[in-house]
Amino acid sequence: MKEEKIMKAMEILNANWKAEDGSFLYYLHEENNFHEAAFLELCSCISSLSRCHPQDQTASLKIVFVYGQVLKHLLYHFDPQDLSVISNLPSDYSEKLELLEQNVIHYFQGDR
């Protein structure tokens, strides 16, 4: 069961890392769309990895990359010099960002 959960979480992380169709990063990058379900799936995947597969170097690099891309896209959205506009960006986007940040921090802190 644990192996299956790790494999599923890694599939979700890899899909986001590659911005594959259906992943949160795909929606954000390719469609300029904040897809709530895909966002929650990404957060859940990072949370699962922190419990089942903490601090794997490959996973860590992918998590940092995806997190950085999310931050960049939000910056582009608010940059008046950039034409990128994210549709469906929730009004509580800062809380969403906080949720993602807490999952990333928890991943790197492990069981502390």
Image: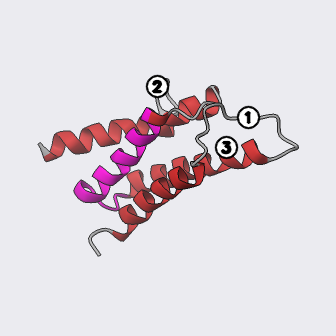
User: Which residue is outermost to the bottom?
Assistant: 112
Residue 46 lies in the magenta-colored region: yes
The span picked out in magenta is 37-56
Foreground: 93 or 51? 93
Q: How is the image coloured?
A: secondary structure
Give the residue drawn at x 30%, y 60%.
54
User: Which residue is outermost to the right?
Assistant: 81
**Image quadrant where residue 60 sits:** bottom left
The residue identified by callout 1 is 85
Give the Cα distance between marks 1 and 3: 9 Å
Amino acid type for the residue under numbered disc 1:
Val
Q: Is residue 28 left or right of residue 35?
A: right
The residue identified by callout 3 is 73
Closer to the eye: label 2 or 1: 1
Considering only vertical position in the picture, is 55 above or below 80? Answer: below
Q: Residues within 10 Å of mark 1 (few under 14, many from 20)?
A: some
Q: Is residue 111 left or right of residue 15?
A: left
Along the polypeptide, which appears first: circle 2 or circle 3?
Answer: 2
Amino acid type for the residue under numbered disc 2:
Gly
User: Which residue is outermost to the left?
Assistant: 1
Q: Residues within 10 Å of mark 3 (few under 14, many from 20)?
A: some
Amino acid type for the residue under numbered disc 3:
His
Residue 93: image location, x then y, percent = 58, 48
User: Which residue is outermost to the front?
Assistant: 91
Q: Name the mark on residue 22.
A: 2
Number of disc labels = 3
Instruction: Examine the rendering and report whether any part of residue 35 can be seen.
Output: yes
